[in-house]
Amino acid sequence: MDVKIETSWKQRLENEFQKPYFLNLAEFIRNEYQNHQIFPKGKEIFNAFSHCSFEKTKVVILGQDPYHGPGQAHGLSFSVREGVPFPPSLVNIFKEINRDLGLSMPSNGDLSRWADQGVLLLNATLTVRAHQAGSHQNMGWETFTDAVIQKLAHEKENLVFMLWGAYAQKKAAFISEDKHLKLHAPHPSPLSAHRGFLGCGHFSKANTYLSEKGLAKIKW
């Protein structure tokens, strides 16, 4: 199956695209786009990979579902395009960056600027029906994104994994702490951010680790 994904990822995931679960997933996704309003746009499903090649990846931030409101999702976890109001979780992310690093609230929520520096903004499920959170869970995407995380964890060293919430922490349980930095915190959602996301210091901790490993810091 010919999947349109950035070359370095395509080379490493080629076997995944031939597996029965992925062929079934692709058929399901095609039908969904034909019969329902699905986010993000089809050409943006693999946007996280387009902005952040395998070689360039330094930090991984795991989300769960794409945003399911109109105009929000564009293939990068937690990110919205310029001009789109900040969702509550993103507001809390920027609040923590302000507290942690003293950076003021940005003018827009487009996190492409992070992705282009080597931050893989990966959702566990890469598509969703409009207004139906979780509607594409357990259809195969999680198996695919597990394979992505395993490739990174096994073939690279000195990555930073920001694991926000029990879902992300469970998904990344197989990452070796001998090779990588795993940062745990509650999810930035308003339901849980006050339980430890706000105050976690992940952004400064990530940059300290990258600097210690001789890698360029992320301009958050």
Image (cartoon, rainbow, N blue to C red):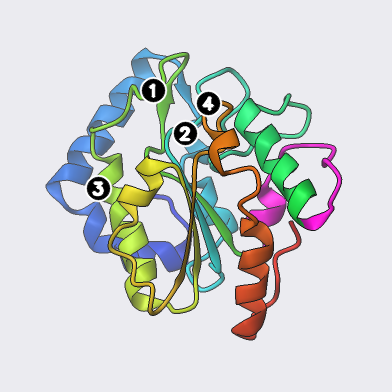
Query: Which dot, 1 or 3, sits closer to the camera?
Result: 3
Residue 115 in the magenta stretch? The answer is: yes
Q: Give the residue pinned by disc 3.
A: 143
Q: Position of residue 202 (x, y in %)?
A: 61, 57
Tag 2 secondary structure = helix
Q: Earlier in the sequence, mark 1 or mark 3?
A: 1
Q: Nearer the viewer, mark 3 or mark 2?
A: 3
Q: Give the structural element (helix, strand or loop) at label 1.
A: helix
Residue found at the far front of this picture: 195
CA separation in Å, label 2 and label 1: 8 Å
Q: Nearer the viewer, residue 192 or 46?
A: 192
Viewer-nearest of discs 1 and 4: 4
Which residue carries the number 1 mark? 33
Please state which amino acid type lies under the numbered disc 4: Leu
Q: Label 3 to label 2, Cα distance in Å?
A: 19 Å
| Residue stretch rendered in magenta on the structure | 101-117
Name the residue beneath numbered marker 2. 42
Instruction: Please state which amino acid type lies under the numbered disc 1.
Output: Tyr
Q: What separation in Å lies between label 4 and label 2 (alpha carbons)? A: 31 Å
Is residue 180 visible in this depiction of the protein?
yes
Q: Are marks 2 and 1 in contact (CB under 8 Å)?
A: yes
Secondary structure mostly seen in the magenta stretch: loop
197 part of magenta stretch = no
Residue 48: give x, y in percent of width and height.
53, 50
Measuring 38% from the left and 23% from the top, which residue is drawn there?
33
Callout 4–callout 2 Cβ contact below 8 Å: no
Image check: 147 left or right of 116?
left
Residue that mark 4 sits on: 191
Does label 1 or label 4 sit earlier along the sequence? 1
Specify which label sits upstream in the sequence, 3 or 4. 3
Q: In which image quadrant can residue 212 be found?
A: bottom right
Whether 33 is drawn above or below 118: the answer is above
